[in-house]
Image (spheres, rainbow, N blue to C red):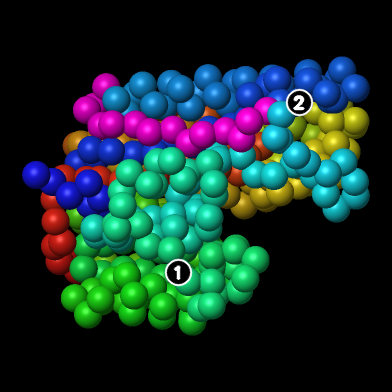
Amino acid sequence: MNNIVNSYTSWQPLEEVIVGRAYSPDYFDFIDNPQVRNQLQQILSETEEDLDNLSRTIEQYGAVVKRPDLPAKDQFVWFQTEGGGAPLPPLTPRDWQITLGDKLLRVLAMPELDNICKDYGDAVIKPHRSVWDADCILNQASASCIVRVGRDVFFDNSDYLRPDQSRWIVDNVLGPEYRIHEAITDGHGDAVFAILKPGVLLSSKHDVNLNLAADFPGWDVCKIWDSSIWAAMEVGKFKYEQSPGAWYVQGQTPTAEFTDFVNTYLNKWTGFVAETVFDVNCLVLDESHVIFSAYNKEVFDYCRKHRIEPIISELRHSYFWDGGVSCCTQDIRRRGGLETYL
């Protein structure tokens, strides 16, 4: 029987995955301003529609999909004060945990994932709080700083994953059979480079601090300079001066009231999407099928060159949440074991 937790790469055949979840629109029925309430509820409704569609797409290729819980609506608490705001929804599980071989490392404790993770028993690793800062498991570290390539594991030692935290993971989760590499991606590894299968690698204009030729000798690297986000912004008539690159809503121009509301109360939800290359932030189902959130001719031509079928599962509000397909999914089990690729 296969291990219940088993994933050494991002491309071995996917068997089980977590797909994130946004809050339901009715969680924000209390907002008095109808313009703000309607815009936010539309984003939430369309986000869940897209995540449901992503789940169905994954299931069509044979993988089991699990979804996080939501807090009870009557227990949903947020602070309507300057500097306060709404807590993060369980939308981007790849940011908070990662499967490393037969272990599931929970980098950040999200209670909405507790019911899923308890099914994995002793495979779940939670660093002891005495090792890390007390406010969370890894002091707001991000699992997206870790990229698995079988026996080789790349760590981005940055503000999102300190060197001492990386060392703890190496000593307590991985073990001596792994080879560790440093990769500087400013905490966004899964939006800087993605391995579609051995020898086939997507990267972005943000890979300037990586030495891909040395780390992946002989691999065919496709570097993306023009992200699909710019075409989406043009179609949506995005007013850059109103919210310069931090977030935007596809297909509409947010009202001034909504912009102020987001920047005041939902700032934990948003990132800085103008610098994110969502075309790299993808989910590999197997060596022949990869899910992307939008069409990019250069990426799709590259996939077909390597006999990979690109599949679109639209995430209309990636540019609001700053989370693509990779961010919104976290693989639990893939078919295969520990192999050497480099």
Q: Quadrant of the N terminus?
A: top left
Q: What amino acid is found at the position of numbered circle 1 in the picture?
A: Pro
Magenta: main secondary structure: loop
> Which residue does the image show at 34% across and 75% down from the upper left?
172
Q: Quadrant of the C terminus?
A: bottom left
Q: Is residue 11 left or right of residue 92?
A: left
> Which residue does the image show at 71% across and 29% down from the upper left?
74
Q: Is residue 154 visible?
A: yes
Residue occupied by mark 1: 127
In the rendered image, residue 251, in percent from the top left (x then y), is placed at 68, 22
In the rendered image, residue 113, in percent from the top left (x then y), is placed at 47, 43
In the rendered image, residue 201, in percent from the top left (x then y), is placed at 31, 54
Mark 1, secondary structure of its residue: loop
> Which residue does the image show at 61% across and 39% down from the upper left?
89
Q: Is residue 70 magenta?
A: yes
Q: Is residue 79 left or right of residue 90?
A: right
Q: Is residue 217 magenta?
A: no
Measure how far apart labels 1 and 2 are at the Cα level: 34 Å
Mark 2, secondary structure of its residue: helix
Which region of the structure is painted magenta? Answer: 60-73
In the rendered image, residue 327, in percent from the top left (x then y), is placed at 48, 45
Residue occupied by mark 2: 28
Q: Is residue 246 left or right of residue 65?
A: right
